[in-house]
Amino acid sequence: MTVQQQATVDGDALEVWIDQDLCTGDGICAQYAPEVFELDIDGLAYVKSPGDELLQDKGATTPVPLTLLTDVVDSAKECPGDCIHVRRVSDKVEVYGPDAD
């Protein structure tokens, strides 16, 4: 992922993370947004840093690029494991994903 403008909701920057405990390894996320998501050798999906590094720490987050917001949101909506969470950075409130209001 190259340096891009970060997506926001009401002026708050967005980040995304994956709960690997719920990940089914289906790979829909990597199909929608390969710049943000990747399947690892363990068969589970992880987010990638803006520098394209796979982030394997539990709860690792990455910024949501503005140009990929729709793809990331679609990934969260279509994920069979309901494990993709998009939240505001400022207060950690989920705006897309299984825990969004």
Image (spheres, rainbow, N blue to C red):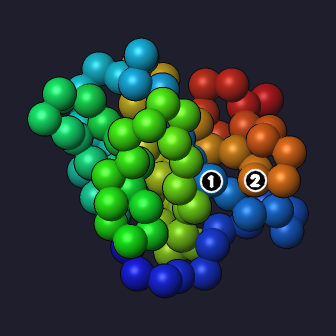
In the picture, the quarter occupied by the C terminus is top right
**Of 55 and 83, the residue lying toward us:** 55
Q: Amino acid at mark 1?
A: Glu
| Circle 2 SS class | loop
User: Where residue 61 sits in the image (x, y, percent)?
Assistant: 55, 48
User: Where residue 2 sits in the image (x, y, percent)?
Assistant: 40, 81
Q: Name the residue beneath numbered marker 2.
A: 89
In the picture, the quarter occupied by the N terminus is bottom left
**Is 61 drawn above or below residue 79 in the view shown?**
below
| Circle 1 SS class | strand
Horizontal side of 99 relative to 55 (left or right) equals right
Residue depicted at 63% across the width and 73% down the height? 6
Q: CA distance from mark 2 to mark 1?
A: 6 Å
User: Where residue 75 sits in the image (x, y, percent)?
Assistant: 42, 43
Q: Amino acid at mark 2?
A: Val
Residue depicted at 42% across the width and 17% down the height? 22
Labels 2 and 1 touching (C-beta < 8 A): yes
**Is 29 drawn above or below residue 51 in the view shown?**
above
User: Where residue 50 sits in the image (x, y, percent)?
Assistant: 44, 69
Residue depicted at 62% across the width and 44% down the height? 86
Which residue is situated farthest in the top direction here?
Answer: 21
Horizontal side of 14 relative to 75 (left or right) equals right
Circle on res. 58:
none
Horizontal side of 101 relative to 68 (left or right) equals right
Q: Name the residue beneath numbered marker 1.
A: 15
Residue 77 appears in view: no
